[in-house]
Amino acid sequence: MPDTPTASCDITLTVNGREVRRPVPARRLLVDFLRDDLALTGTHAGCEHGICGACTVLIDGEPARSCITLAVQADGCEITTVEGLTPEDGLSPMQQAFKECHGLQCGFCTPGLLTTLAAAEPEDHPTDADIRELLGGNICRCTGYQHIVDSVNEAWGRS
């Protein structure tokens, strides 16, 4: 069977504050574009069905699953990955709280958790139950979630 050329599209998007223009195959997933084409490996491909949350990025400020989003769907959008959450001079307050409160163990889910939290407003989620609900779309197999909740409370100044 002869090779069939894959349709390609030119996209322009802003990733972590930097404009990116690239041709991409029409069926390339955003997670693969970020990891393989842009070497932003903080975004993890976990379940590849949009369930686990490890691939969460912000698209125009809203959490989105990059494993079920085509790169061409992000054309013209602003994308923030976990790398874009980290200030040049160290860790963000949420990252520091995760470190201090043991909110991560293996770390596989952590980028998706941090990205999800980056879109949240602390006053919108004042209770532990609210934090757990906010993070309900992010699966962690290591922590049991209590240290994650403690980390969020620490970062939001409610510990």
Image (cartoon, rainbow, N blue to C red):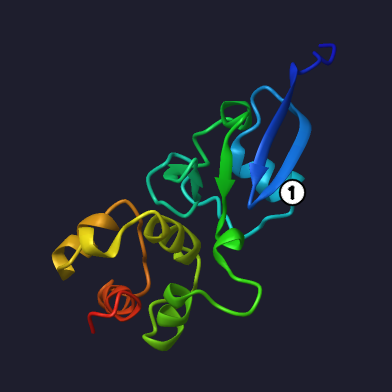
Tell me residue 60's x, y (percent).
Answer: 49, 40
User: Camera-side residue: 43 or 157?
Assistant: 157
Tell me residue 134's x, y (percent).
Answer: 26, 56
Tell me residue 132's x, y (percent).
Answer: 22, 62
Q: Residues within 10 Å of mark 1 (few under 14, many from 20)?
A: few
Reply above or below: 31 against 100. above
Residue 50 lies in quadrant: top left
Tell me residue 4's x, y (percent).
Answer: 80, 13
User: Camera-side residue: 71 or 121?
Assistant: 121
- Which residue is most to the bottom? 100
Reply above or below: 119 against 72. below
Tell me the kind of residue under disc 1: Leu
Quadrant of the drawing holding the C terminus: bottom left
The answer to whether 9 appears left or right of 97 in the picture is right
Secondary structure at badge 1 equals: loop
The answer to whether 77 appears left or right of 104 in the picture is right
Residue at (50% x, 71% y) in the render: 107
- Which residue is most to the right? 2
Residue 1 lies in quadrant: top right
Residue at (23% x, 80% y) in the render: 158
Q: How many marks?
A: 1
Q: Which residue is mark 1?
A: 38
